[in-house]
Amino acid sequence: MPGIYDRDLDRNPANYQPLTPLGFLERAARVFPERTAIIHGKLRRTYGDFYARARRLASALEQRGVGVGDTVAVMLPNVPAMLEAHYGVPMCGAVLNSLNTRLDAAILAFTLDHGEAKVLITDREFSPVIKAALAIAKVKPLVIDYDDPEFTGAGDRIGELEYEDFIAAGDPNYAWAMPPDEWNAIALNYTSGTTGDPKGVVYHHRGAHLLAVGNVVTCTMGKHPVYLWTLPMFHCNGWCFPWSVSVVAGTHVCLRQVRAKPIFDAIADHGVTHMCGAPIVMSTLLNAPAADKRPLPHVVDFITAAAPPPEAVLAAMQDAGFNVTHVYGLTEVYGPAVVNDWHDEWNDLPAEERAVKKARQGVRYSALEALDVMDPETMVPVPADGTTLGEVMFRGNVVMKGYLKNPSATQKAFEGGWFHSGDLGVKHPDGYVQLKDRSKDIIISGGENISSIEVEDALYKHPAVAAAAVVARPDEKWGETPVAFVELREGATATVEELLAHCRAHLAHYKCPRHLVFEEIPKTSTGKIQKFRLREMAKEM
């Protein structure tokens, strides 16, 4: 029998609405219509304009038959159209698939086919690779070119029409609807394909709403922050920051490319308060020529992921005027869901002890219900002793719906009622989690995931290669870079330069090995490659 609090107290439109980040923009536009929402080069766009353009996009898409559950793919750098897509695409019920602008044509074609893209909006900078991808893809989406005034390079128009012409046909007062169910998909993001084809990670409106607000809380974003886009928006939907900034009616400062001088100029000229990025962005800032640097108007909050920055880098960033916060997450949890929540008293520790604290990934976001390190076989949490290895696992509303068209992978990822990250770590006595290894040998270079298996497969395609193994090598600039160890076939010959050229012909350039060594690859008695030994060898190089 229902309790007294369930009698005649039902859900209805007055007391229950599905959670979605779409309302963040609507509210910002109504409360602060004249406030600057977007800065891009000479362009200034208010929240009123931003909202109207997002509605135009939604309306134009609907006019072309795009609706609930349809996929709209975008191949865009950090430009205003990318921000508009984060609202306009789901406003008509469609799902946003932000393509990784660094991928090759074959992977892009697979992604377009797997996601069944109905529309593709593409920046002219990427016309060559998109043209090649469309030539081998099975789907034939409506292609829309985006002409960015800040783009000064070459690039053919390959679409049916240009973006501005497309949205001009849309209604700025388009009556978009809340999703009927907050469980509805809002975005599709692809993993790097660690064991074969990439997996399509599906986000829902509820999770996007919660993580967007979680970012505001975790990253101490007060009212009207100025957010600089140094993190690619294609990566986990920019960690949900396209939605977060609207919560507090902040200003987006767009950058097509991550370069030191434009970053320092943006911070000084626009009063940037927050930015995110991989360790490579920190290296770019710290190693910039003096002529490219400018004094910061105030302390800038810098949120970074991937490997924890070394103590020396953190000290240098602090001296340069940046307050660094380390976060951790995966595509499957909407980006960052764990933060190294810093205690003020830790600042007084000796440098060595402070570095130990800094090396930890941390504790769960407030938007995540549970985080633990567990034995994946027994599903029992490991002791909080800082030494017992287990698998890092997540549970909560900011975990993906699952993998698109891949029920077996989804079931495996959610075994035991937790999301299995595949990352190995330990739990310290205070509950802070620290990663120790990546069980699938993922290499994180410049914030991008590189599958060692994918690189090895490319090497094996060369007729002279008998065996290949790829591991990560620590790198001051990129965090990690791939190193390849190769054994040649008996009687075969190949040079380092030849094999590296072969890799570049089969992989996106950022995935190619930075170093290649001809070496007998250590194996177990059963023939299994001992990658831990190769990692040690790579560190000594």
Image (spheres, helix red, strand yellow):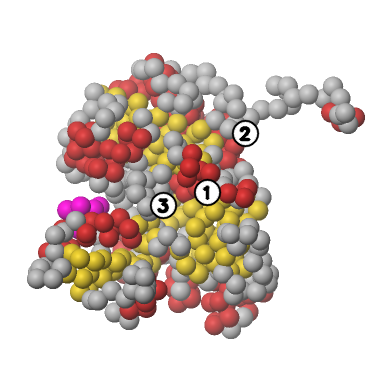
| Residue at x-position 52% and y-position 59% | 328
Q: Is residue 49 magenta?
A: no
The residue type indicated by label 3 comes to: Leu
Which range of residues does the magenta coloring cover? Answer: 503-509
* Mark 1: amino acid: Ala
Q: Which mark is residue 413?
A: 1
The amino acid type, in three-letter code, at marker 2 is: Leu
Q: Secondary structure at mark 3?
A: loop
Measured from the top left, where is residue 178 in percent x and y? Answer: 57, 25
Is residue 458 visible from the viewing direction of this image? Answer: yes
Name the residue at 40% across, 74% down: 532
Q: Which residue is mark 2?
A: 19
Give the SS element for disc 2.
loop
Marks 1/3: CA–CA distance = 27 Å
Q: Position of residue 541 (x, y in %)?
A: 29, 79
464 or 436: which is nearer to us?
A: 464
Which residue is label 3 attached to? 231
- Say which of marks 1 and 2 sits in front: 1
How far separated are the C-alphas under marks 3 and 2?
A: 25 Å
